[in-house]
Each structure stands twice: as C-alpha cells, then as structure tokens.
Amino acid sequence: MSTVYFIMATVAAFSLGGLLLWALRGASHRTGHGHGLQALERAPQHLRNMTQIRRAMDAGDLEFVMAKGGASLFSRVRRERRQAILLYLDAIRRDFEQSLHIARIVAVLSPEVSGSHEYQRLRLSISFRFRYQAVRLGLLMGSLELPQITRLGQMATSLAVQMEEAMAKLGERAALAADLALQSDR
Amino acid sequence: MLVFAGIPTFALALWGAATLLTLILLVRIIELHRYREYPRFSLYLAINLLQTVLGVALYQVYGFASAFTYRIAWTSQAVVVVARALAVTEVGYLVLGKYKGVWALATRILAFCGLVSFGLALYAGRVSYQSSVTTLEIGLEACMATGLAGLFLFARYYRIGISPELALVGVGFGLFSCFRILNDLLYEHLAGAFGNAWNYGGSAAFVAVMLVWIWALRKPVAIPIHEPQLRPATVYARLIPQVNERLVALNEQLAQIWQVESPKS
C-alpha cells in the first residue's frame, strides 16, 4: 500500500464521516414540502419594486444631482442607489431560491425524475450562489462605477419584460404547485 | 474453553461485549417485531452472531495459526460485509424509498459510486490474498460510507425528513465503515506493526455502534414520518423544464451583472 493511497484514503474516510454528520444535521426537523405553499405565496413579491429599481438605475438622474446638488448629494444618492441594487440582487436571489424550492417539491412528489434536469438545477444553484456572492462583494466594495450601473440599469430594463413574462408563467405553475403542496399535506 | 486461553483479556472482553450486545439487539428486535421494518438489518445481526459461532468452532478445532482458519475467517468476514451492505441499502430505501423518483435517481448515482469504489479496490488489492481481502474490505466500506453520505445529502437537498431512529441506524453504519477504513489502512500501511491493536480498534468501534443502535431501537414503534402522496409523472415532466428555464434566466441575469462587473475587478 503506497503512502499516497494511505493519505488519500485516510482523508477520504474523515471527510466521509464529517459529510455524513453534516448531512444529517436537523434531519428529523425537516418539514419536507410542507412550506411549499408559503413559498409560493411570496413568489412575485419583488416585482412590485421593479419600476422603482429601474428608476434608481437611471444615470441621467445622477448627472442631474451632480450638477444641481453638488458632490455631497451626489455621493449620498449614489450610496443609496447602491443599496437599492443590493436589494434588487437580494430579490433575484429570493426568487431563485423560491423557484428552486418549487422544483424540489415537484421532484420529491414525482414518481419519475430526470437526472439531467436535476443535475442542471444543481449546477445552476451552485453557479448562481457563487456569482451572487461575487457580485454582492463587488457592489459592497464599490467597484461598480456609474457607467456600469447604467449598463446594469439598461439590462434590468430589458430583462424586466422577460421577468414579468416568466412570473406570469410561474403564476400558473405556482397555482399547480400550490395544489400539489395542499394535496401532499392532506 | 481452551480456545479462549490464547486470547488477551482485553480482546476477550471486547469480543464478549460485542457478542452480548449483538445478541441483546437481535433479541430486542425480535421481541418488538421490528424485523418487519428492518429485515436486512436483522439478518446482518444474525449473520454476525453466526460468524462468531463459526469463529469459535474454527479456532477451537484448527487453532489460530492455521491457514485454513485464516481463509475461512476472512471469507466469513466478506459475507458479513455483504450482509452489512444489504442492511445499508435497507436504510437507504427507508429514507428515500417513498419518493420513487428521487430514489430511482439516487440509486443510479450511488450505484455508480459503488462501482468506482469496487474498481479501485480490485485494482489495488491484487498483491496477495490477505492484501486483496483487506483492500476489498476498504473498498466495500468506502462504498457503503459514500452511499450513506450521498443518501443523506440527497435527503438534505430535497428537504426529506428522517426519523431520529433511522438517522442513528444510518450514522452507526456510516461511522463504522469510516472507522473500519481507517483501521484497515493503518493495519495495511504499518504491516500489522500494532499487532492486536487492529482487533481492539475494530471490536471497540463495533461495541460503540451496537450501543448507538440499541439506543436507536429502544422504542417499540418508530415515530412516523410524513407519508408523501405522489403526483403523476406528467406534472414533473411539464413543470420542471419550465422552472429550470426560469432558473437559467435568473442565472443568466446574474451572469450579465457579473460580466459588467468583472472587467473592473
């Protein structure tokens, strides 16, 4: 038995033991899909603020503030807008988590699941979480400058339509999933 | 009682404790009719006891130094490990079996992990009979521990509740497998330099696991976990691609923000 094999297998054994205990944390307190309905009721919440967020990303406003109100007001408005973008990001994250939650309910209650769909969702959730933290960190460190915020605003504007369409579709799906959650609780 | 004369007192005490606890657990399971819920687990305990009886008979007749005894003892150990693997699959079924779709997916993925472990074990254990048995055991234990960790990860990902009793039974199997891997690794790597310590370690771990299982199965009836009412497969087929599309859209939205931000960072 080589030393490399010995070390790798030892690390693997400890890792497996740790993973096992971690995976079981709170296992008996999990409510399964009981919270499905609650999650669905909250689903379209952040879209109500979409118009305000779009306004907050308007570069013209900032230029006007700089010209009329001076540097102090400009920096204050800029800081507040950054906060608004952070809130917007957080809303996207919540929306993502809720969609993920709905998908889990459906998968758990289905007699057949597709490996590729499940894998796609897992991959997406990992990628999303990584990007979310990276973007959030960038915003907190103030690395997003005015032109970038403008682009972000333009992008958000163009995506708003898609979001609204997606949410409308999700509304139909949410009704179905709510029905699933209700039936599973009976 | 000549067979016990050559065994160190501590090893004998551990062996006796392990046998007694196995017997207590098996009797308790039979008494409470829990073998209906855990048939493979009960079979594993029974095989364990039979192995003990076989071991005593072999050592009594052929002695400890006999090559025949050595081979039979290791072969019986393989039977015990296979019985344990079957008991582990039972734990898996009890956790995820009600959720047919997730269970089918989990078995495919975890079976793949098992095949990989077996492949590695067969490749590494081609030196000698003794080494191959130990390495095969390491492979099987790794396979079981991976399967259990994977199983509980599946349950965590899908927010599936597990009764404390079943969780303890699973943890017992998982940690025992991890311990056996470490024990076998040390034994193989140090070429048995620790002598009886290998046996002490294995027996002590088994005693600890038995105590966990006795505690887990102390109640006559398991606490029922929410029984799911499965929906037609068409619901998943219709809904999931749409939800995934939405997740892709949200992910792309974030990716675009990332792309805007990344040149600056």
Image: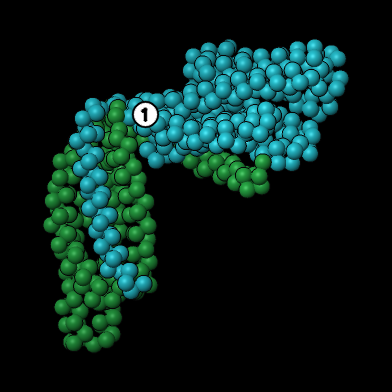
Chain colours: A green, B cyan
Left or right, residue B148 beside residue B81: left
Residue closest to the eye, B54 or B97: B54
Identify the residue under disc 1.
B104
Which residue: 22% across, 68% down? A152
Up the image or down, A79 lies above or below B164; here it is below
Does residue B257 appear anywhere in the picture?
A: yes
Left or right, residue A156 beside residue A36: left
Up the image or down, A76 lies above or below B251; here it is below
Q: Quadrant of the C terminus of chain B?
A: bottom left
Which residue: 55% across, 28% down? B169
Residue closest to the eye, B232 or A89: B232
Determine whether the residue tagged by mark 1 lies in a helix, strand or loop: helix
Percent across and percent down for residue B176 are: 61, 33
Three-letter residue code for mark 1 = Ala
> Which chain hosts label 1?
B
Up the image or down, A41 lies above or below B9; here it is below
Residue closest to the eye, B70 or B232: B70
Percent across and percent down for residue A125 are: 34, 49
Residue closest to the eye, B146 or A51: B146
Which residue: 33% across, 64% down? A135
> Which corner quadrant of the image does residue B121 belong to?
top right
Circle 1 packing at 10 Å, graded few (<14), some (14-19), many (20+), is some
Which residue: 22% across, 41% down? B241
Does residue A184 appear anywhere in the picture?
A: no
Left or right, residue B109 beside residue B211: left
Percent across and percent down for residue B78 are: 62, 23
Left or right, residue A160 beside residue B84: left
Percent across and percent down for residue B189 are: 70, 41
Q: Quadrant of the N terminus of chain B?
A: top right
